[in-house]
Amino acid sequence: MKKIINGKLYNTETAHLVGTWSNEMDGDFSWTEESLYQKKTGEFFIYGQGGAHTRYAQNTDATHWGEGEAITLISYDDARQWAEEHLTADQYQEAFGEVTEDSNHLTNTGYITPAVDFKHIQEVLVIKELKQTKGE
């Protein structure tokens, strides 16, 4: 599925699939399947599908609802939360890094979302010398 949101393209065929979850209610009006994706820019989104009794339902006419699909943008923190709830520990750590525990609670952890996908980068330019500024 492709969708343009706020002038940006979100495409399930070109984004990295982090993982998929289903409520396994196939054939029911409440069936739901969601997949977490990450774009090369680091942004996360969920591609969801569902039956007539789900948040993905779509109007088929004035009085009926049917199956539907949607792309929903989510933040890095929301993507981590979704992954914790729906993916295996291995899938989570592959996407967000190894989880370490701090038993004495003296360490704070922060997350930086890079502007590029470093897993798929082929070349890196390293600047070895600083350019002199005017007046030096």
Image (cartoon, helix red, strand yellow):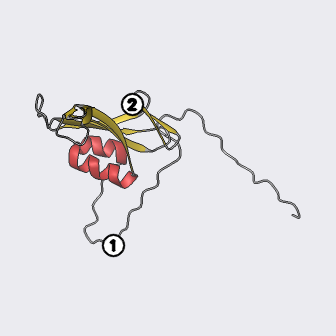
Q: Tell me where residue 55 sits by quadrant.
A: top left
Q: Measured from the top left, where is residue 32 in percent x and y? A: 19, 37
Of residues 101 and 68, the one drawn nearer to the viewer in this rendering? 68
**Residue 25 placement, left or right of 70:** left
- Residue 35, compared with residue 75, is above or below; it is above
- Residue 3, compared with residue 106, is above or below; it is above
Q: Residues within 10 Å of mark 2 (few under 14, many from 20)?
A: many
Q: Quadrant for the N terminus, please.
A: top left
- Residue 63, compared with residue 95, is above or below; it is above
Q: Measured from the top left, where is residue 97 in percent x and y? A: 36, 48
Which residue: 30% across, 33% down? 69
Pick whichever of labels 2 and 1 is earlier in the sequence: 2
Task: Report which residue position mark 1 lands on.
Answer: 106
Amino acid type shown at disc 1: Leu
- Which dot marks residue 12? 2
Q: Tell me where residue 136 sits by quadrant.
A: bottom right
- Residue 86, compared with residue 11, is above or below; it is below
Q: Measured from the top left, where is residue 47 in percent x and y? A: 32, 36
In front of the other: label 2 or label 1? 2
Which residue: 36% across, 48% down? 96
Of residues 72 and 64, the one drawn nearer to the viewer in this rendering? 64
Q: What element carries label 1?
A: loop
Total marks in image: 2
Q: Is mark 2 on a helix, strand or loop?
A: loop
Of residues 128 and 109, the one drawn nearer to the viewer in this rendering? 109
Which residue: 42% across, 57% down? 111
Amino acid type shown at disc 2: Thr
Q: Residues within 10 Å of mark 1 (few under 14, many from 20)?
A: few
- Which dot marks residue 73? none
Q: Measured from the top left, where is residue 43 in percent x and y? A: 44, 44
